[in-house]
Amino acid sequence: MASDPDPEPQSDPQTPTITDPLTNEFATLNDLTHDLDSLHELATRGSWRSILDKVARARALSFLRKPHEHLTYLAFHVIALSKLRRFAEASAELDTLDDLDAAHYLYQTYPNIYPTRSGSMVPFSLRWLHALLPIKLGKRQLGLDRFYALLDFVRSKLELKDGISGNIWKKREGFVINSIIGHHLTNKEFSVCLNLIQFLLSSDPSNPILISKLGYIQMQIGDLESAKSSFNRVESMVETESEVELKNLVNRNKAMVYMVGKDYVSAVREYEECIERDPMDVVAINNKAICLMYLRDLPDSIKVLESALERVPTVALNETLVVNLCSMYELAYVNHSDIKRTLSNWIARVAPDDFDSSCTRI
């Protein structure tokens, strides 16, 4: 009997289809890993100490039975330690993994446990922390080397992926590049930052957030005209948009230009427009208060920050805002130590575990 010269491909019912883990969907987080939903909820609330307890309990009671579950819990453990600024412990825990690309961290190494999955089971957050932690421990060059190696790793994946998985890796590329930009900005290495921003814009030229970031960098190197040009591009792009965040972005950009020119009254006006649209725009709230302080209106600048902490404590409670408020207390009041102590006691009741209470400078 002659064979069909062009047979249609058929799947063997006995052979499961191998899929990329990034494209697998699960009904719930708990279907992916033991009690993952609870860990996620604790992280959302900033309950990092509770996460440490939960991970320790799961390990002690042998709740983690599959290789990927151990890695997922280790990721939460390292993140929690990092959030609590216990960087040496976080680094030591991460070092127990040795080579993140080793075969025993691949799904296909365990076909009996993962018959339909292939690829690395190492959470991307661990790869990112592997680069970040050396910087936190004072080893900046090692950390930057690892960030650039991570960028190469992400780009190697981008060459092979498309669809849902490709989109995820593209977002990761942007995330890593923005992390690298942040570290170069800290050391005023502006030319590197400009090159990286231009690379991001080459594939996303109409991104108003990226163009605004370009403007901020141009402003820091003293190129005010180029910064204004970038901000004008953003304004022309979003003038027909109804999204509050984009409209506020335009106002914040304008306010920054006014602040550089020491026109604090006009800057306050821009920030007030932002706050009117979105009462939780913490950047606008903080910067409005700073402008009022420069205008020597300490009572109103203090009132702006205190009001924000009362109205939206979960959003407004960050170290930068609290440092600024305490600085204003020190300028405005003789008994600023008592006032800061009252603030510190309130923060202790409402702040997440990772809030740095030393910012009150008591």
Image: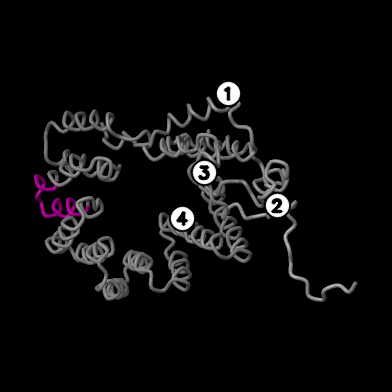
Q: Which residues are magenta?
A: 287-301
**SS label for mark 2:** loop
The tag on residue 179 is 4
| Residue 73 left/right relative to 260 | right
What residue does disc 1 label? 60
Q: What kind of residue is marked 4? A: Ser
Which residue is painted at 27% across and 33% down in the image?
350
Q: What kind of residue is marked 1? A: Ala
What residue does disc 2 label? 16
Q: Position of residue 176 (x, y in %)?
A: 50, 57
| Residue 69 left/right relative to 46 | right
Q: What kind of residue is marked 2? A: Pro
- Which comes sooner in the sequence, label 4 or label 1? 1
Q: Nearer the viewer, mark 1 or mark 3?
A: 1
The tag on residue 133 is 3
| Residue 201 left/right relative to 95 | left
Which residue is painted at 38% across and 37% down in the image?
46
Q: CA distance from mark 3 to mark 4?
A: 13 Å
Q: Callout 2: 10 Å neighbours few (<14), some, many (20+)?
A: few
Asked if 147 appears above or below 71 in the picture, the reply is below
- Which comes sooner in the sequence, label 2 or label 3? 2
Q: How is the image coloured?
A: one colour
Spot the residue most to the top.
Answer: 61
**SS label for mark 3:** helix
Q: Callout 1: 10 Å neighbours few (<14), some, many (20+)?
A: few
Q: CA distance from mark 1 to mark 3?
A: 26 Å
- Which comes sooner in the sequence, label 2 or label 4? 2
Q: What kind of residue is marked 3? A: Leu
- Which comes sooner in the sequence, label 3 or label 4? 3
